[in-house]
Image (cartoon, rainbow, N blue to C red):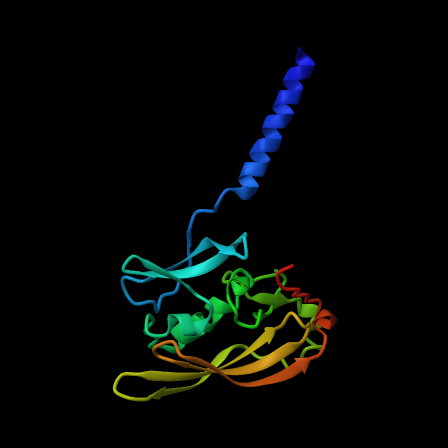
Amino acid sequence: MLRRTNMEMSATLILLYFLSRTAPLAATPLPLSSLVSPCEAMTTMIDHFGSPRLRAVVRCDGRAVRIVGPDSLEGVVDIKTPAAALEYVRFFSSERTYNLFNFGEVVEIGSFGKDRLTADGRYLISPEYKDVFQSYHDAEVVERRDVVGSAKLFRLRRVVVGTDGKIYDIEESVSGNGSYTVLSRTVLLENSSRIGLLHLGEI
């Protein structure tokens, strides 16, 4: 009798484990301060060729649209400051969010530090590699221009790592309405493992 009870308990645990792995995840908010009201961004499960995948959507007035990349947010953001421009590009390229979008699977590198990640999901490089990676620079907004009326245009430079194992210095353009362009991309390091950094992408 005891043996049967143990078997039943094992079967129950297995079933609970299976349900926990297959049950849809509740929508989780994705913070982005430049989204215009009443729009909000969140993660949700979306069918991908018959398999559920965690993806990002933006919901405005009850209608949800998948966020594929910056093009999906054009017209539903209002970027007015350099800080908001940096937050916008980091929205697509943090270690926690890059796999939600079609944004080249890059993750920004957020300077040197003993931890693996910054609070907002950028990679940190161990201080012991400073001599190896002297070409690193902090992310910056190198230009801010007023275009038409109150419209803004920002030019940014960041260091990112790709799933190809290379580290890039990229220059980007972000407009006030969310339009995004890569202006240039320069390889700083051919092999990110030389500085103890591995970014393998979604496996």
Q: Is residue 194 left or right of residue 35?
A: right
- Residue 83 seen in this snapshot: no
Name which residue lies at 69% across and 15% down: 3
Picture quadrant of residue 137 = bottom right
- Position of the N terminus, as image quadrant, is top right
Q: Is residue 67 above or below residue 85?
A: above
Of 86 and 103, the residue lying toward us: 103
Name which residue lies at 56% across and 42% down: 21
Query: Which residue reaches farthest front?
Result: 50
Q: Is residue 14 above or below residue 124?
A: above
- Position of the C terminus, as image quadrant, is bottom right
Query: Which residue reaches farthest right?
Result: 194
Instruction: Count up the numbered dots.
Output: 0
Q: Is residue 6 left or right of residue 121?
A: right
Name which residue lies at 40% across and 79% down: 179
Name which residue lies at 66% across and 16% down: 4
Image location of residue 185, percent across then percent down? 58, 84
Q: Is residue 59 left or right of residue 106?
A: left
- Residue 54 seen in this snapshot: yes
Query: Which residue reaches farthest left?
Result: 149
Image location of residue 74, percent across then percent down? 37, 74
Image location of residue 17, percent across then percent down? 59, 36
Q: Is residue 16 left or right of residue 32?
A: right
Image location of residue 141, percent across then percent down? 45, 81
Of 92 and 142, the residue lying toward us: 92
